[in-house]
Image (cartoon, grey):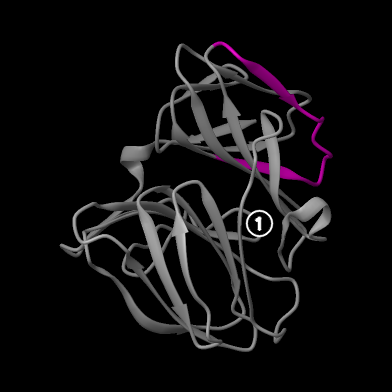
Amino acid sequence: MIRIRKAQDRGQADLGWLKSQHTFSFASYYDPQHMGVSSLRVINDDRVAPGAGFETHGHKDMEIISYVISGTIAHKDSFGNVKTLPAGEFQLMSAGKGIYHSEFNASNTESLHFLQVWIQPDTLGIDAGYQQKAFEQTSALTAVVTPTGENGTLKVQQDATLYRLMLTPQEQVHMPQLKPQRQLYVQLVEGTLKVNDQVLTPGDGAHITAEEVVRFSAADSYVTALVFDLA
């Protein structure tokens, strides 16, 4: 079964400096039909004005992933990390026992566009931590976040794997057969993507369960998407 979450149906927030679209219930947006998928709790599609950003604030017991689509994030946190996160890179912040951080648009002239993802950890009260990496796309589906941190991936405190899907025009790739207890969530960033017989356009999501074969096919454009493999 493939259930499509159209981009225009997401929750909307406009704070002036921030325009955000919420795949799942978040802040003042509440929809009991869209509370998350398994441990995946938040996918926010955020656009931040030049020079603006999220002031210092705190989190506990959450795995927070950022993926920059365009622009650069300026990151600071209470553990002394002062980093920049350019387009194409991934950041994973394990809030654990508690962490304070700020995330700003590093440019005073260009906008920032990134995806903010929250995954609920399987263990509470772990030590907080920060990871960041640019990944070479070695295949159409490249693992970037895993529960073990294997092969240089970022390590998440949950039975969840995040892949970056990148296809050239007309390219096609198959996912391994889904085990009955697992599910996929796909968030399309760029291009037109066909998932089996369903078509996604930028900003769309797809929740996939109980499919014998999951086939990703690009149309006449390049495709970039995030694919979550969840327990």
Question: Within the magenta stretch, is there residue 147?
Answer: no
Q: Is residue 201 left or right of residue 181?
A: left
Q: Nearer the viewer, residue 87 or 147?
A: 87
Circle 1 crowding by C-alpha within 10 Å: few under 14, some 14–19, many from 20: some
Residue interval drawn in magenta: 170-186
- With 94 as the anchor, is 14 left or right in this view? left
Q: Position of residue 83 (x, y in %)?
A: 48, 70
The residue lying furthest to the left in this view is: 16
In the figure, residue 153 lies in which quadrant? bottom right
Please report the residue visible at 46 percent of the width from the left and 11 percent of the height from the top.
220
Q: Position of residue 101 (x, y in %)?
A: 45, 80
Residue that numbered label 1 is attached to: 38
Query: In this rendering, is residue 229 above or below 42?
Result: above
In this view, 103 is above or below 191:
below
Question: Could you say which is closer to the camera, residue 146 or residue 187?
Answer: 146
Provide residue 14's location: percent of width, then percent of height.
Answer: 20, 59
* Identity of the residue drawn at 65% across and 16% down: 172
Report the label total: 1
Residue 29: x %, y % from top left: 33, 62
The residue at the point 46 percent across, 85 percent down is 58
Is 181 magenta? The answer is yes
**Is disc 1 placed on a helix, strand or loop?**
loop
Q: Is residue 66 left or right of residue 44?
A: right
| Quadrant housing residue 182 | top right
Question: Which image quarter holds the N terminus?
Answer: top right
Work out whether residue 106 or residue 199 is closer to the camera in this orientation and state it.
106
Amino acid type assigned to the residue bearing label 1 in the image: Ser
Residue at 47% x, 60% y: name it. Answer: 85
